[in-house]
Image (cartoon, rainbow, N blue to C red):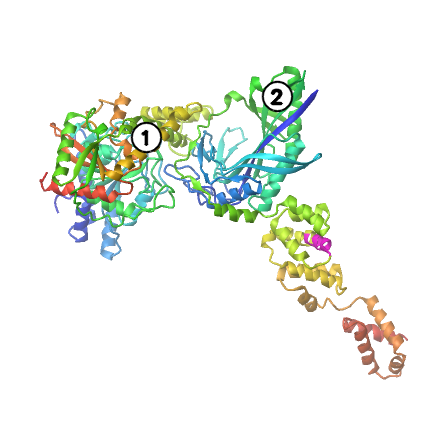
Amino acid sequence: MKYEVVIGCEVHVQLLTKTKAFCSCENRFGGIPNTRVCPVCLGLPGALPVVNQKMIEDAVLAGLALNCKVAAVTRFDRKNYMYPDLPKGYQISQYDMPVCTGGKLDIETEGGKKSIRIIRLHMEEDAGKNLHLEDGSGLSYVDFNRCGTPLLEIVSEPDMRSPLEAVSYVQGIREIMKYLGISDCNMEEGSLRCDANINLWIYEDDKRYETPISEVKNMNSFKAMRNALKYEIKRQLAEWQEKHLSLMNTGKVTRGYNDKTGETVVQREKEEEADYRYFPEPDLKPIVITKNLVAETGRRVGELPAAKRKRFVSQYGLRKGSASVLAASKALSDYFEAAAKGYGEPVKIASWIITEVGGYLNTEGLTIEEFSLPPENITRLMEIVDSGIISSKIAKKVFARMAGSGESPDTIVKKLKLNQITDRDKLEEFVAVVMKENPQSVADFRKGKDHAIKFLMGRIMMLSKGRANPQVSAAILKEKLNNG
Amino acid sequence: MDQIAGKSLTELKRLLDRGEVSALEIIKAFKEQYESDRKKPAPLNGYIEFFNDAEELAVKADEARKAGTSGILEGLPIAVKDNILISSRKATCGSAILQGFTSPYSSTVVERLMNEGIIPVGRTNMDEFAMGSTCEYSVYGPSKNPANREYVTGGSSGGSAAVVASGQAPCALGSETGGSVRLPASFCGTYGFKPTYGSLSRYGLVAFGSSMDQIGVISGDPDDIALVISVASGFDSNDLTSEDVDFSALFPLKRMRLKGKKIAIPEELSGEGIDKEVGIVLERFASWLRSEGACPETVSMPLLKTTVAMYYIIAPAEASSNLARYDGVRYGLRDITGNNLEDLYVRTRTEGFGDEVKRRIFLGNYVLSAGYYDAYYKKAMQVRYLLKKELNRVLKEYEYILSPTSPVPPFKLGTKIDNPLSMYLTDICTIFANLALLPAVSIPAGTTSKGLPVGMQLTGRMFDEKGILRAAKTWFLKESRGEV
Ligand SMILES: [Zn+2]
């Protein structure tokens, strides 16, 4: 049977603004239930929303990065439905005047580059969380800490033709949002959530039949997303063969993915679909987005990860893997480029930043933005290694100290006397050369003229350009002279 | 000091400032007035609660005056409608559904007044959620008209008008969505003022029709209103629909030279449909204006005929959404006798809301629902825009619009309670100011042959609170000297 898979995605991204969308409560994941709340996000009588300006800026930034058109005037609307995690009985969202429309995101597919069209991007507030006790009491609780967290909803056209493409698309969104620093896009914590609308176009008897659309929810990882969509394709094919139901007969159903069974189950049929009775939010005036803000924000978008990745490969000769890691964050890629500037071997710098800097940040629990070491210090450290003054093993020690103290690599090398040669084999070589070249002094020493040792030490220092460790060298020299 | 009860806020302030009376004496006098009325066979039922710590607060106010740390309203009493929040006080909006709710925060208006030392002395009765024109739709039973206890006070701020008219408070806060301050002021024979939408913050005013809601003031003296507005008005960062206005110099009001002022009397609110006795008072008021040198003339504004229809689409639509939060989950009434979430919602709301509130929730949900939105809500908003344009055009040529506050004089309790449509028509003269956001004041301008009060209404240009209050003051001065 000939068929085509058709997928469109609705992606929700939680923003990392300091405060919530419409109140001044701290916007952070988790916390003791109902501690990050106020009259506004609890929906108390008389409370009114106040728009977080940063949410609007982030939405414009995200929209521009996704090649969207930014509205000159945007407006909030109320989406009315009752649920315990929704304290006002409506969600402040956007309906017919979203902040951004008409964008696209390019993804890589087996057949090359493909553009996925984006219908719209809008702002809304997140709901709280219902917690159902599983102790047989039947009790449920609500935690409103998450309530009012700013969200961007990004809606695509049904342009994806396989689960793989859908995953690439969502990964692309995630990459950009993380790169812009507006969301951490953690699927497990729910800061990135994707609902996929999927159906099949089945070609039979020279006709095209469309199977009922499933809106698939609860996909908490990319793996879950791939599996859920694969399952849906199988299920819809089987259903088609058995019942020949088409979109015309049944419309859309909401199905939830169960990670344990690998299956999707019906959550809501079409008839149960809510009428959200949208209307303009009377508590907020329409928002004018100035050309200035759009222009300024446009400059902030700059080069996005995909383009940057390509350039890192062609300009610096990085491998794809390293290029991806560095291009994923604006701060990290800027750091790399600053360190690589004027240094002949960017590949070496890249691997240093990825392993050493990356490892340091990981153990210290820091972000690259919080990392205060100037990138030039990394460059200088590389140069010191290249000149053979210290080994790359020692360089790691220097880095550890410099990352903590902020001292320059030269200072650290000097302070720790890392430039001294203490390696016994190397020093023995020096001693041997000097003894060979100065037989007279050797003979003098052996005759009891102790001052000869001073002369020989001077020769060793000259030969090692002053880097030989004096104590160790002297000990070796004495040993050799006495054993002679 | 005899006869404290019955004096205006302004007079009491003068006495307090001069040290001729203490705050404690004032509060005691009003409390006594309230308590003696409660012992009567048909109490006015203006207060839902007279705060039993009011006297304690008065003692503190007297101490503050002695210490020289007093605010400009230190120790002055004010009654507050049951839908305007005061921190740590109950607020029920005259509804069973909010039984047990204590507000954790104060409305901005109350907070600003309290910062200047005012003492809220009690909560006043109202139609449930401010939906009603008679104050009969209250879970606490109707308030009664001090002029004749068989008559309604008008609504929804009926309790506020009753306590002021009967000397149980010098001044009261009410709230308006479609005339709820002006109408009871007119029925009870006091001044009632609705500011321009945005002059006072709505933060902490329990929402009914958000795009029209506005706190208003009721008093026997226009200067009291000016005093309260001068302290409470101006931009509030908790209400983005509030405006950056400066009315700090509003008090004390100067009288207005009316000479040459053009005043429009809408044909639609002065002829057919207006009670004969009301018409006589209107004529008398117009001839007073003429005697002052003003030029009242009849003007046709056909859209005024559509205001009731418009209002009863827009206000219920907003209300249906605003009242969705009363679901039994977080505060107020909660019926958990059922088996599931749906039962919790249905039982709580069935018990908690009265008939009129239910009627408007149904109406609001209906006009917002898919397939009806365009025909009702959207159309109403379009006509509202036209109405604003028409009124602003008239107000360019004319200084004020004059009409009766109500087409009918006060009527007997129970006469309209079962006929919502006839009840709704009581608002025909007041609604347009709310729809068009304009400031308006109801002036006690006369009585019927039975001695029932009749109010006249002056509506002004956007943010011209000063103009209409000064005109009201001019009437007040003449009237109190018996010169009209
Ligand atoms: Zn909050």
Quadrant for ligand 1 reads: top left
Q: Which residue is mark 1?
A: B95
Q: Amino acid at mark 1?
A: Ser
Q: Pinpoint residue B110: horizontal percent, then vertical percent.
A: 30, 44
**Mark 2 belongs to chain:** A
Q: Pinpoint residue B295: horizontal percent, then vertical percent.
A: 17, 38
Q: Residue at x 15, y 30 (%)?
A: B452
2 and 1 marks on the same chain: no
Q: Which residue is mark 2?
A: A210
Q: Pinpoint residue B107: horizontal percent, then vertical percent.
A: 33, 42
Name the outermost residue toward the front: B397
Question: Callout 2: few (<14), some (14-19), or many (20+) C-alpha neighbours within 10 Å?
Answer: many
Label 1: state its secondary structure.
loop
Name the outermost residue toward the left: B482
The reply to whether residue A28 is in sight is no
| Residue in front for this viewpoint, A349 or A114 | A114
Q: Residue at x 87, y 73 (%)?
A: A433
The part of the chain drawn in magenta is A345-353
Of the two numbered discs 2 and 1 in the rendering, the one whose residue sits closer to the viewer: 2
Q: Note whether ligand 1 is within 8 Å of mark 1.
A: no
Q: Note whether ligand 1 is within 8 Å of mark 2.
A: no
**Mark 1 belongs to chain:** B
Q: Amino acid at mark 2?
A: Glu
| Residue in front for this viewpoint, B398 or B178 | B398
